[in-house]
Amino acid sequence: MPDPQSKRPGGTDAPACDFDAVIVGAGFAGLYSLRRLRSMGLSARVFEIGSGVGGTWFWNRYPGARCDVESMEYSYQFDDALQQEWEWTERYATQPEILRYLNHVADRFDLRRDIRFDTRVTAATFDEAAGQWTVETDDGARVTATHCIMASGCLSARNIPDFKGIDSFAGATYHTGDWPEEEVDFSGRRVGIIGTGSSAIQCIPLIAEQADRLFVFQRTPNYSIPAFNAPLDPEVQKAVKADYAGLRARARRNRSGIDFTVGESGVFDVAPEERDAVYEERWQTCGIGFLGAFSDLFATAEANDTAAEFVRSKIRETVHDPAVAELLSPHYHIGCKRTCVDTDYYATYNRDNVTLVDVSETPIGEITRSGLKVGERDYEFDTLIFATGFDAMTGPLTRIDIRGIGGRSLAEKWKGGPRSLLGVATAGFPNLHIIAGPGSPSVLSNMVQSIEQNVEWIADCIGYMRENGFACVEATVEAEDAWVAHVNEVADATLYTKTKSWYIGSNIPGKAPVFMPYIGFPDYVRKCDEVVAKGYAGFAFVEHSDAPEVLDDSKPGREAARTARLRRAR
Ligand code: NA7
């Protein structure tokens, strides 16, 4: 329940509230937000649905779950002692190792005392009169805070398609993003898995080794690059740590925020044999860095198809049955749906106990008591796994009843697609700060790097408000419109928008087809810095003394009155 401290930024006569900030989520974003705000002397309360810290890495415990960004990079950089002391054991860290790391961070910075676990935020309502948020949780509690920080993740709202008969299956069911803590033993079992995205591609080889039979129901095949995962060489780790700042700086200069070089040549600047040699070298060594082979892979279909064909040739080489190899071969633009990184994925289809079922033409008709039906054919199994992904980026935000000025709901505002300024703010929702939101690089970059940048930007903005006696900050509609147009313009110049993917919401029936992430980490950081340099251009601030007046939404001129009270900082 509300803590006794009652703080207002900058000192004011505005009504006191329970915390300076409520933070939703205790994953990478929530933990660092808490740490950062605390270091500024602010009070914060974190609400987390899980019983522990970790966010994505708390929930996605399926067999084989690991990060597809190398472990030395997929870690915080805000504290050099932390990055020096933590020892990663593998090239790509497993889910348990990342979870251990985040638990270490929580303990090291004594974060748990401000986190309420097992608590879901159900609603957040902005009180215009008080200039504060009221946050409600599923245990019936309500707390107030000046700032509401959404650290709720990009891939945390699970998607289970509304299959006919979904509740009739008699066996055990799992979603990869809500995997139980205890080990699931598939020995002697017949298993059905729906989906062939990253999660499925990671768990299928391991489940196939254990289960009696495995049926994989595939709607769209995926491109996957071999991880060549291995124990991390202590000498490599030592060398990285000797110049960690150098690695981080190089990564920040890349579009993905990851330290891999992007080839300077265009695909057709080199002869076909040389091109294949480049692809082969990247295939053997780079993981998703394969996509950086040439400068124009995302620019034209012709260039892109050379990389796509290279991967298809690898699938044909690996998979013995040509019909299965063809079914596994994607034909969309490579990289425009999330490219996977795997261990033995394609080779798994050479096993006698694995059956690939194509559901692209004839979709899954119905879940039955003993399995599922595709067309006239029944598939029977004991365990059903949904590897069906997430309502990405917007889902974690719109599934909470967030209401801003005039009681307007965020879900309503974003019905036609998300609208934000820099991904961190959305007009009409003062003091609502979004980390890795739509309109920011987030899922197209090293998430940890993007999260840290967003957390620091938001914390600096809050610091700026305190220094200047501002009670509220809000994106202006004009600046938001311009940002949304810019995000689309950048995306439209690539092949991303020509491919159906969760980046564009096409995995969720009825979701507006809007490309959500911002392409280009360095450009994004530059834009964020420019906004600050221009006195938070595009943001409007309200001074404390302006805040308490109650506005009647029904009165004509209400909007004008409000706008008049919003002052540009400079
Ligand atoms: P993804 O990548 O969204 O994969 C979900 C999979 O589920 C994908 O193959 C979907 O096919 C499939 N799917 C979804 N709905 C259906 C229905 N109705 N019928 C059949 N198949 C369906 O989620 P993941 O959890 O694998 O990965 C998420 C991210 O986590 C990943 O990108 C990394 O960033 C880490 P579709 O492709 O939509 O045809």
Image: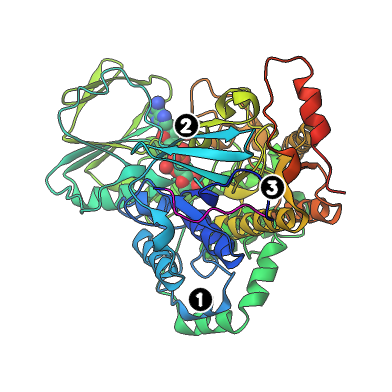
Residue holding disc 3: 297
Image vertical order of residue 405 relative to residue 464, above or below: above
Task: Give coordinates of residue 392: x percent, y percent.
Answer: 51, 37
Question: Residue flagged by tag 3: what amino acid is it?
Answer: Leu
Q: Nearer the viewer, mark 3 or mark 1?
A: 1
Q: Was residue 569 drawn as part of the magenta stretch in this picture?
A: no
Q: Main secondary structure of the magenta part?
A: loop
Q: Would the CB of label 2 be found within 8 Å of ligand 1?
A: no
* Range drawn in magenta: 2-9
Q: Residue furthest front?
A: 13
**Residue at the spot 34% in from the left edge and 62% down from the top edge:** 96
Residue 526 seen in the figure = yes
Residue holding disc 2: 399
Q: Was residue 4 drawn as part of the magenta stretch in this picture?
A: yes
Image vertical order of residue 449 relative to residue 372, above or below: below
Residues at marks 2 and 3 touching, judged by CB atoms closer than 8 Å: no
Viewer-closest of 466 and 65: 466
Local crowd at mark 1 within 10 Å, few (<14), some, or many (≥20)?
some
Q: What's the mark number on residue 82? A: 1
Q: CA distance from mark 1 to mark 2?
A: 34 Å
